[in-house]
Image (cartoon, grey):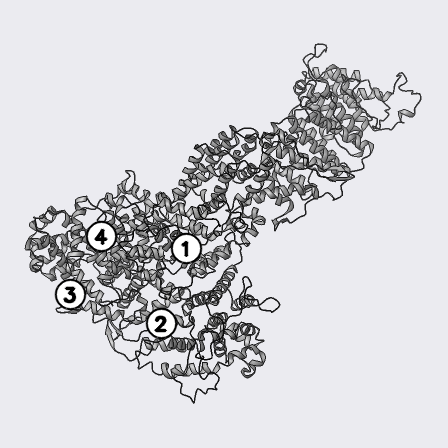
Amino acid sequence: MESLRTVISRLFVDTYDTPIQDWKNVEKLTTYGIFNRNPSKRRRQDLLHPETKNDVDNDKSVVNYTASSHRIDYDTLTHDFVRACQINGGNTAEQLKAIMIKYRESPITLEKTTRLLSFLHHVLKVIPLSNSTTTTTKNTIFPLGTFLEDITPVLSLAPASQSSWIIILQFIMSCFRTCPQQQIFNSGVTMPILLGIVKQVLLEMTWLPAKDLDSVQTKCFTVGKELFDMLLIRDNGIDEKILENSDTLTSDFVGVGSLTYYDVIYSFPELYGHFLNGTTPTTTPAQPSISNPNIWLTTLYYMITSILQDHKLLERIPTVMAINIIKHVLREINTLPADLTTIEVQCLNKGKELINILLLGPNGDGAGVVSHYDIIVALPEVYGHFLRGTFAQSIHWAMEKFINELGKRRRHLAFLMMPPDASWPLISQMSRRHEYNDLTTRTSYHMFEGDLIEFVQEGNSTNIETHFRDMLFQRASMDEFRQLAMSLTQTGLDTTQIRKAMVEKVRDVIRCIQHHSRTGKRDERDVKMTDKENDSFNPSGASVRGEDITMCIPNNIDLWELMTETADQLYSFVSADFFSYEDILQDFYNLVYKPNGDPYGPSAKDHITKDNGLVWLLLQLFYIEKVSINVIQKDFEQDEKLFDKLVRLYNEEQTESQDAFTLRDLSLQCAVNHQKANIKDVTNIKQRHPLIAASLKYAGLCYQIQAYFSSYYHSNVPTNSTLFSNLDIQEMTKIAMESQLRQDVVPYTLYVYLVPTKADIDTLGHASTTYVKGGTLNYKLLDLLCVNAKHSELGPRYQSTPSLVACVPPNVLDVVYKLLYSAPCSAELMIKEIFEKLRRCDKMIKMKHDNETADNNNNNLTAQLPDQTMRWLQTILQLMNYRFIRFLKYSPLSSGLLHYIRYSISYLENRQCYQSLESFTVNAIHMQMDVKLLRSLDDPHREKPIWFAESEMLARLTVCTISRLIKTRGQADIKTDQIYRVLSSLYEHRLEWSPEAMKYFPSPVRSFYESSDSPNQSVPVRPYVTPQKVQQLISTNKAFTAYILHGSPEAERIVLQYFSILENQSSLLCTLWVIAITRNTTECCNMSAVRNLLLLIPPSRMATNTIDLVDFILSVEYPPNSSEFLFSLLDSFIWKNQWVNFNHVLFAFLKGGGSADRTAKAMSYIRYLLLSSHEFQKRVQKWDSLKFSHRHWTEDNFQKKLMQYLREYPEYHEFESFAMHQYEPTMELPQQQTKLPIYFTNVVSDFISSMENLIMRLIENSEADLLSNILDKYGHLFYQHQSPLSFVNNILLYYHSSETLRNPYIRKRILRLLDFDQIVIVPDAKRYALDDNDNGSKFDVGYFEKVIYKLAGSLNPQKCAPRTNPNLPERHFREIGSPAVEGITIATLEIMLTPVPPSTIIKLFLDLSLLRESHHVGVSALTLHAIGLLIPLLPEKEFVHPVLKELNDLIETDQYLLEISEPCRLIRCGIPKRVNGRFEITQTLPDLTTTAVLRDSMSARLRKAMIFPYIFNDYKFNLHNYSTNAPNSFLTLFHSIVHYSSLDIFSTFLEYCQKLRNSGKMKTDVQLLYMCFLLGPALHRIEKLDCSDAGFLIELMHMVKQVTAAMDMRDGWTTQALEQVYDFLYHIRTRFVKSNELAAQLREIIRTMNPPISQRLIRLVTV
């Protein structure tokens, strides 16, 4: 150690710098005079590795050397150092570290550095960098790594250290030059050490001034670059391009070349963190900065060179880092001035060169680190959000071309992800969940917003406003609006879209009525509004007669339903605070007037002329209390600005036109009359508002109407029960006018009329069901009343205390349901209250059952439900079941209805009420139209695990409904496991189905019942009642026969106790059957005893017990020729004794299960009950004789007719028929329940619902003759069904493969279940249905085109779907109130009823869509969407498969798809060149003849350039420019079909994609791009699939391989279509790595592709 201390002390003694003179000015040197050459040269050699060659350029002329006062003997110091190392065991590194520690002590001077390097120079002579036989320390190697590690921290470019910088770096480089690379690494030089040197040198160089470097700084920078060359450039990787771009390299350069600049980036997050994580530094400028050209050019040079000398480096550079580098380069370039200097051009070019090499790879063939798509995605981070064609920040002119080219690619991709037309109408009551989403909810919308905003604004795509517009047109419920509005609020969108849609609807309705109205003034000979309209009128002194007042009624009065519907919606939105009166008034004003106050002309787009209909709609809002008090009243108290706008909407000419309507045209005067108490200075109102003068001249008429109503109606209403009956339209309009003039007078008057205080009392069946007999109101009068008047207190009221009047009058119920249909939106609150109370009743019934169970265990009595509650429940259930099913079917309540009655279904005890409940449940199950029923039934929070534990009938009906929904609507995204769970939760026992029924089940339902591993196999089987069991029961228990036959008191307790056990009840009816057979009659039974036994069976189990009875009847072997007796015995069970329900019996015979023998026997019983037996036929004949209307809303005396029917054929519910006569008891009966009112319930009405199951089972079992006979006899009853159109449609769809249904004889009888006077159907279809001799020859191309065009018209909200036929029902009373849903249902019917083969129909549809055959003009986008909407509703195999086959044929054969698209060069950054003193970007055209893909002639290229874009254009653009083509039209149609289809279609589509690829006919890039256009817009739905998602991606990648296999894409050439495909693949790349298995499969496919395509795509599957 002493030797080492000596070395250190002598080496670093007095190391302060002392400047000396310049060597060049000294002629004779004293100190170094022994040399004949410049002594600095010798000193430079001493500061390098001893083996450095003299010809190496190590010029240090800029180094300011110092003179030392000490002469050092370096040889002696070296000897001492070596001896110290030997003493220390030969550890040279440790000894050297001690010297370096001393050296690093401050200050570090040039003298100190010079001594150290000179010392090391001498040490290296003794201890070389590699083993040498000539040295004495043979086994010792100089620890260069230790030296570099210790010297790195002192490297600095501070002014005092710049000379040290130069000599240290040159010493290091001399060491690297003299030894092979491997020996350098053996000397302890590691990659981290080299990276440390590079990082330190780079960091110091970065802080040098950006410009105007002095000679020393320049030399320092140059030496640093030389070091970088040595460390970062491989001598075997140098080519001419690298040499050309470097000012430090020579052809004989030798470097270590073990690093790349990207290694430096990785290891230097302090400087390059923004390359690694994408975050831009905020405290210091991001490096490299283009404002420092030296660093910029150096850094980018080495980044480029690293790739050029090692192409495999691209595989190790992460895409994210490369993107961050490109973003940084673009940001820096954007800081350059417009007028570039030479150095700035160099910086620009270097930046572009780096972008090109990262983008296109070293060969320029596209195999780079990033894709064009990656840069497209990154551009908004550089230039800001792209909107309306520009970025937020300006783009430097030198980059504009490149960015614009990328913009084109982005736009192409944006439209690849969108169909050619996406203006799909929203079908609110039928739409699936994804249809409520619009373009703006897509995850990629933000990226494409700037490109697609015009696409949306021009109506080529749906948006929130169009959704609301469609919902308004289709009369959607307020709940749907509220749900969608809530979703908008969550996404931060403006909810005023609802108001815009509402104003659009108002505009369309007004325009529609104007279009159908006659223009011109009324003839003077025509009746005026009133003969006294110009006379002064004194209401106190004049007697007004009705004939003195004449209302103007237009010929197009049928269109007024559009106004009442719109008023109801507007009233509801304003009441619910969706928008305000002021906003709506302003919107209406803007419809009519320009911003400058001038009115719009009649032909102005999106505007209308002033119309009194606008005033009438605003008048409806006057009756909203908050509007009246807070807005209108305050406006009259202030400046009357709002009133002035209202006046300016008034149209005097309309008042005097041929189609004037007093109710509408006097609405302004009604508004004045309503607010006259708040108008200040009424006498001068004409002066303030001159335009009101025309309206005020009708003030006398308004006074007359008020006086007439008061004197004639209001005064006489208590004594005249027919006062409002049989009114003509004139009288109705007068009453409606009064409702507008005075707010509450008409509603109160009508209520007194309906429920008079002094009136007769009548009953609703039983004597205790009393009600007040009041008057009836015609539905037309109710429709004409103002919206507010419809919401008055006309609802049912129920007596809670004993009273002479116990029930709601039937005429009140009649008015209630008519008002609910007339104003469904504004009456929503009342409907919710009804269902909320229904839910509470359900909970009460559950609590009562739970308490009874507990009390039975404790022998306590449970309180019964109050009578008024039971009467309310009975009333509401009947109202909903017989009058409200149409309304509920298409409401949001539909799928969840069973939740309101889930406990009542099982536990309700009142038998009369239970029949209404059961009938309602049956209809609620039948009416379902969407698979969301499955989600509702699968509610995990329900307390009741089994829905219909007591009723096999309800469970079976639900299974049939689920099967129908899945088969006709698709399984959608509902998992098979969920379907299994629902089916398992329907019934407590296993349901057995016949093969005939199972044949038509959809696959998941069928597998549930057939599969051995299905959960159904674990469900227990319900035990059957066998003849042996019943016979044994009777023979071994004499008490049974004693009690049943004689009513023996001794046997009563035993028998009642036995049958009170639930498991024994199933044999009760069977026992009665056996006893009756034994005695040949039922008269032998003691009826009271039988009644007591039957009352033991809960009402909810009667249907199941009836099934047990029927199964028992069919299982017994009877003597020959006993059929007649058995039939008559069954009649007595049903009709005489009323022990079983007729409709239960029908269902039991046709439950859908059992053997073929059982089915055959059941059919004989069905034939008897419906065709041979007179019992039911007599009831139907009586029913028909009463002439019940098919349009029940037009019937004012339904209750009277029903009571006539029931008096002749009374129906009982507690097995008391033996003791009753027309609802009057003939003897005392114990255990009677509360008697409830009968409003609608009867066996005939319930049979109409039972006909659905009857028809289905007869079709399944091919009972054509029996079915036709039944339909001929009872088909007319189906006119009274609440949804016959839906049922017939569902039958045709569900059983489309049935040979029975294909029989024209049967099919026509099914069609005749429809009342064709209530639907708009093509005349040829009606003629075919009604005429047995019509063979369907009229079903030609013209017929199907009519169907499509009619459907398109019903989808168009601008047309408003007016009632063209006055014989049709009003829109709100039709089976389907939505014009769109009605049009879809009818169109489906019109297709399915024809005998034309599906393939022919599809061909005709495609001919129309694709301009084939005789079609030469393209159809509208809405027509294509109508076809796209219709096809998914038809059977998939017969209608969807042919479409997909035609699609494959088009792809394989279309001449435009079979051509390769126009070749092009890969997009790159153009390098500006100096031309005439200015820098310009020039595009050089290559030699086209040398490239394989460009062998087409110039004419072929021009043809491609012209045709190719039209294939993928907007459909409407092509249509308007006469450039429609089959591929584009099919693309539009395909996406329309997919949009309206369930997810099931994608499995089928995947099969056809596989067929297409395997056909080998996918050969061109245009075909490939077309496939991408097919998949792109649908990916947001495909990704919801578990298996098909991966299948599509694999198929697509196989297609890419197949198409590119024959294409030579080298030398930077490509095609337009291929580039769009690549962008699309990168856009969806997140889907490629969803699973490791999928990524591995895709990786293998890509690796087998031709280069450079495989290199371009391999990063798609890099996680």
In x, y percent, where is residue 1646? 51, 31
Observer-side mark, 1 or 3, equals 1
Say what amino acid the circle numbered 2 marks.
Leu
Badge 3: residue crowd in 10 Å (few <14, some 14–19, many ≥20):
few
Q: Tell me the CA gap for discs 4 and 3.
A: 43 Å
CB-based contact (under 8 Å), mark 4 and mark 1: no
Q: Which label number is shown at residue 794?
A: 2
- Residues at marks 2 and 1 touching, judged by CB atoms closer than 8 Å: no
The amino acid beneath tag 4 is Leu
Whichever of labels 3 and 2 marks the residue nearer the N terminus, that label is 2
What SS does tag 4 mark? helix
Tag in front: 3 or 2: 2
Q: How crowded is mark 1: few (under 14 residues within 10 Å), some or many (20 or more)?
A: many
Camera-nearest label, 2 or 4: 4
- Residue 384 visible in image: yes
Q: In this view, does 1049 lie to the left or right of 1426?
A: left
Which badge, 2 or 4, comes first in the chain's sequence? 2
Residue 1351: mark in rendering: 1
Q: What is the C-alpha distance between the residues marked 4 and 1?
A: 32 Å
The CA span between labels 2 and 1 is 38 Å
